[in-house]
Image: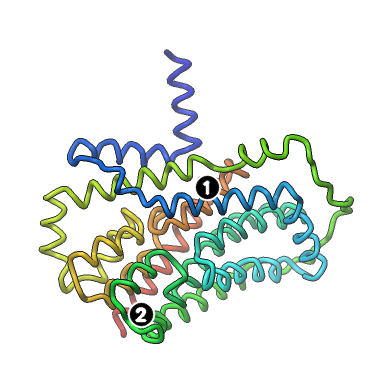
Amino acid sequence: MTDLIDKTSKFFKKEIVFSISLILAVVSCFFAKPSIDYINWDTIILLLVIMLIVEILKNLAVFEIMVRKLLTKIANTRGLVLILVFTCFLSSIFITNDVSLIIFVPFSILALKKIDKTDLIIITVSLQTIAANVGCMALPIGAPHNIVMYTISKIPFQSFFLLLLPYIIVSVIFISAILFFIPKNQIVLPEMKMAEINKDNFLKRVILGIDYFLLLTFIALFILIGNLESIPFFNALFTKWISGNEVIWGILTSQIISNVPAAMLLSGFSTNYEAIIIGINIGGFGTLIASMANLISYKILVREYDEFKIRYLAIFTLLNIVLLIILFGVYQLA
């Protein structure tokens, strides 16, 4: 019995986000009838395919080769972190914030490990996640929540961009200001042998390398959100309070259920789509759960460095809350 408790405790600590999501989903099932239709299987399958591709690239030493080329062209640590962060910003505009982080967070961890600068991993991944959430605001195709709102609202492409442009500019200034404090140490390249591809058990390593608990976390969250939407109390509450307070509700609901389901939820109770778009995009900053992208980078990091978990959460949350307050201030002044 004691052994079972110890194993359960260790699993909970290791997979804390999945464990909490599962508990909340199960509890919500006592108040509403769950349905498999709540699960967005397109999202789950897309994430699985992307993770599979990333694992194949890693095991083919593609990341290793790219990291080596990058390190030979950058002189100092600040320049390296800047490149890694703004690569996430630019790529998220076109390939979504989720995909950007799945590809470039492992790449960044490998690059910093190569030059023995693991102390910079936490701040780098934190800023990469913020940058991806900022970059995805530039175009409606940059994130699932914006795709949802663009489809529903039918706001012109240019108007969508101009609506969020002030928040993008302020966020880029914020990221640049934080990057200024990154040490500008010279990069000392270690002696590196030829990159080798390990062909032994290739398929097994690829399959075992996928983070299945991340996929299960998303499934648990979809069920939780679906149940909440069908509970009369929450339905009545949203109907009464959302109208005229879309930005506030966009921010608050994103902190609890993330901004993708928040977009779907709020658009069912209000036609003030511009306010909802602002709210859910600002709301992507804040808690770890505020954006699905936040969960992705967190899971990738703790899988490589579990000992960084608490420090990462502290630094990530602090930076996100500060930016959230700043962006809400921008909204108030607009």
Question: What residue sits right under mark 2 in the picture?
Answer: 330
Write the residue at 25% across / 41% down. Answer: 34
Front residue (pair 225, 298): 225
What's the distance in space between the residues labelled 2 and 1, CA to CA? 31 Å
Front residue (pair 111, 49): 49
Name the secondary structure under disc 1. helix
Instruction: From the top left corner, tell me how far across and down residue 285 is, in percent.
Output: 41, 64
Residue type at tag 1: Lys
**219 with respect to 121 (left or right):** left
Rendered view: 236 above or below 5: below
Instruction: From the top left corner, tell me how far across and down residue 185 is, in percent.
Output: 75, 66
Instruction: From the top left corner, tell me how far across and down residue 39 is, in percent.
Output: 35, 48
Residue type at tag 2: Val
Q: Quadrant of the C terminus?
A: bottom left
Rendered view: 142 above or below 287: below
Q: Quadrant of the N terminus?
A: top left
Q: Are marks 2 and 1 in contact (CB under 8 Å)?
A: no
Write the residue at 35% across / 80% down. Answer: 330
**The quadrant where residue 163 appears:** bottom left
Q: Given the current orientation, which residue lies at the most extreme top position? A: 1
Write the residue at 38% across / 68% down. Answer: 324
Name the secondary structure under disc 2. helix
Front residue (pair 72, 159): 159
| Label 1 crowd bin: few (<14), some (14–19), many (20+), radius 10 Å | many
Q: Which tag is nearer the camera, tag 2 or tag 1?
A: 1
The colour style of the image is: rainbow
Front residue (pair 254, 202): 202
Rendered view: 72 above or below 177: above
Question: What residue sits right under mark 1 in the picture?
Answer: 299
**The quadrant where residue 329 appears:** bottom left
